[in-house]
Image: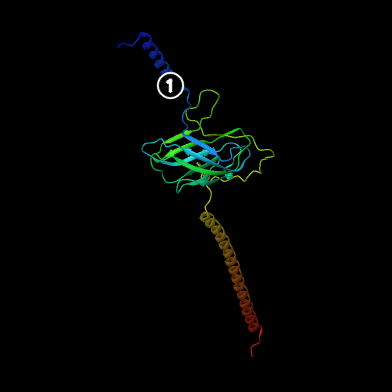
Amino acid sequence: MSTHPVARTGRRIALAGAVALTATLALAAPAAAHAEVEADKAQALAENATLSFVSEAESDSAGFTELRIVLPEGIAPGDVTLEEAPKGWKLKATDDGYTVGGSALKTGVDAEYKIKVRQLPDAKEIAFKTIETYSDGKVSRWIELPDGGADPEQPAPVLELKAAAPGAKPVSPSPSASPTESETPTPTPTATESDVAAAGSDSDSDTKGAEEDDSDSTGLIIGGVIVALLVVGGGAWWLVKRRTASPPS
């Protein structure tokens, strides 16, 4: 039984339409995010908000060892504390954010951790530029921000915030955290070096004092000897003169 030409044409049109629709949807779909952030209080000026981060594993041969985060304006490194992280991982403050890392995770395991932020800034959205490091040295940089054009290929995790609650106000700034690690640390004397320098200074002072004391003692001794010699010489001169002056008996 042959198929009617009109039916065959209709099926071909429908199939072509389905293929075109699938291609259109695929192109329109946003690129999958490889670093994401969520919050339990996604609201401007929210206090003690817990932020959850996920970095998807991309390597087939190595695991994550460290994630470096650049904090958005309005959040200081001292405002962040670690709540949850892979076993053995620790958070260290930097001059513009923090790092969290430790022993390498297994290959294919996503890096997930949570931090608590003292207060979120008064903004509509905040970005957390993320640099991922694997055990084989590979580095992935999820630091690109939308610019109104095409979607970035390696977008930074962005958290959208609701408007601040009525009456919410910024809390007083927290003290700036000193970076635990620095790329170019300024050399400073160690405690041992300082102690040695101080001890050397004290030792020099003691030595100079001892030398001055020895000099004074030596001067006194020499002076005493001279006086003694004068006394003895004067006595001898007096005896000689007396004997010379005395008449013979």
Colour treatment of the image = rainbow
Classify the position of the C terminus by image quarter. bottom right
Determine if residue 90 is in view.
yes
Q: Which residue lies furthest to the front in this view?
A: 1
Whether residue 180 is visible, yes or no, is no
What residue is disc 1 on?
22
Residue 99 on image: x %, y %:
50, 42
What x and y, as percent, mark residue 90?
49, 47
Considering every residue shown, the one lying at the far top of the view is 5
Q: Quadrant of the N terminus?
A: top left
Choose between 216 and 114: the one closer to the eye: 114
Image vertical order of residue 144 relative to residue 113, above or below: above
> Within the image, what quadrant is residue 247 found in?
bottom right
Q: Is mark 1 on a helix, strand or loop?
A: helix
Res 214 quadrant in image: bottom right
Q: Which of 119 and 138 is in front in this view?
A: 119
> Looking at the picture, which amino acid does disc 1 mark?
Thr
Residue sitting nearer the eye, 181 or 112 = 112
Say above or below: 33 vs 106. above
Towards the viewer: 47 or 75: 47
Residue 192, horizontal then vertical, whole percent: 51, 56
Would residue 84 be found to the left or right of residue 121 on screen? left
How many numbered marks are there? 1
Q: Residue at x 54, y 59 (%)?
A: 199
Q: Where is residue 5 in the image (x, y as percent from the top left)?
A: 35, 8
In the picture, measured across the screen, residue 29 lies left or right of residue 12, that is right
Other-residue count near label 1 (Cα within 10 Å), few / some / many at <14 / 14–19 / ≥20: few
